[in-house]
Image (cartoon, grey):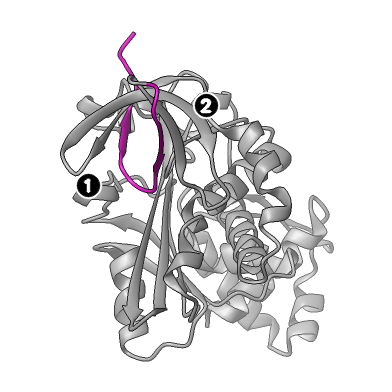
Amino acid sequence: MSDLDSSILSAFLEAGKSPVSGDRLAKELGVSRVTIWTRLERLRTQGFIFEASTRKGYTLTSVPEALNEALVLAHLRTLKVTAEVEFMAVVDSTNSEAERRIALGRQAPFFVLAQKQTAGRGRLGRKWHSEHPGNLYLSLALRPFIPPDRLKPFTLWMGLALCAHLDEVHGVRLGLKWPNDLQTADGRKLAGMLTEARLDADTVRDLVFGLGLNVTAQTKDFPAELREVATSLAMSSKRDFEINLVAAQIVAALERAWDDFSNDRWNENFKNYWKRYDNLTGKTVTIQLRGKPVSGVVQGVDDDGSLILNDTAGQRMLISSGEVTLPKV
């Protein structure tokens, strides 16, 4: 009955620091006062702290540090987001879980969120470290039925929309390293995206967009080999973040970004976002193209999101996919 739990938590979120009467909650939700008390006790075991005030009710003073289904749903309700969200404590990969559910006939769109992934993956078969329950591991499953060519700028657009969201809502300025990494100004990675599609003839039938975003992790939470290159929202901004609120806000932002993309409104902001959050233009890079390295200076992207590169021979190249590396300083 997580729906009842989320309804109770919604009342506390709306009340803020003001106490909430158990009697009022019971009447509004159509349950007994004992049921409310029982639910509060169960929520306490999950890490919520409620302080009781004589004749006034309860005040929510602390929430869990890990992703919590009822609390995310409560935040989504407060944000007036109606997205379907599936929660997993542990999963191999949220992308894989989304793919399985689509294959079984689950109606899309929907999101899959997990506290932990045992086989999280990034581009080119790389593993995404997914152990910390205060980070965000999420997939958005879609059935777009669009031509494959329309999908070219999709991942880039979603990444730019995420940069804009984190900038506008949290004041965290990130850069997008084409095509799928979110980085701080010093090049540390705190998010990666992975888009996987299933084609049926000349149509994209199933589409899964995966996001791994480091939210509250600290240096000690990363494997030794990642500590010099990885970071999190909390580390990069030296601020505290509440993972459940961040998760709900990200779900809302991705839902809006997909709506803009599917309705061809994305290009209204695409170029402005690219100018603001691009991390590569003007830099000398090396790109692996089918195992062959090509070096040059990045000139930007075209309307489809392909990277424009002037190679060392002065030739202009359009690159739709590849692995980008920058020279070590």
Whether residue 251 appears in this view of the structure is: yes
* Disc ID at residue 180: none
- Asked where in the image residue 6 lies, by quadrant, the reply is bottom right
Q: Is residue 277 above or below residue 64?
A: above
Which residue appears at 52% of the width and 53% of the height?
304
User: In the image, residue 217 lies at what x, y percent?
Assistant: 41, 36
Badge 1 amino acid = Lys
Q: Quadrant of residue 247?
A: bottom right
* Range covered by the magenta-colored residues: 314-329
Magenta stretch encompasses residue 163: no
Select label 1 or label 2 by which is in front: 2
Give the residue number, with chain letter if any, for mark 1.
Answer: 127
Is residue 127 toward the left or the right of residue 324 in the image?
left
- Mark 1–mark 2 distance (CA, rounded to whole Å): 27 Å
Residue at (57%, 74%) from the top-left corner? 39
Q: Is residue 316 magenta?
A: yes
Secondary structure beneath disc 2? loop
Q: Which mark is residue 281?
A: 2
Amino acid at circle 2: Thr
Image: 115 above or below 126: below
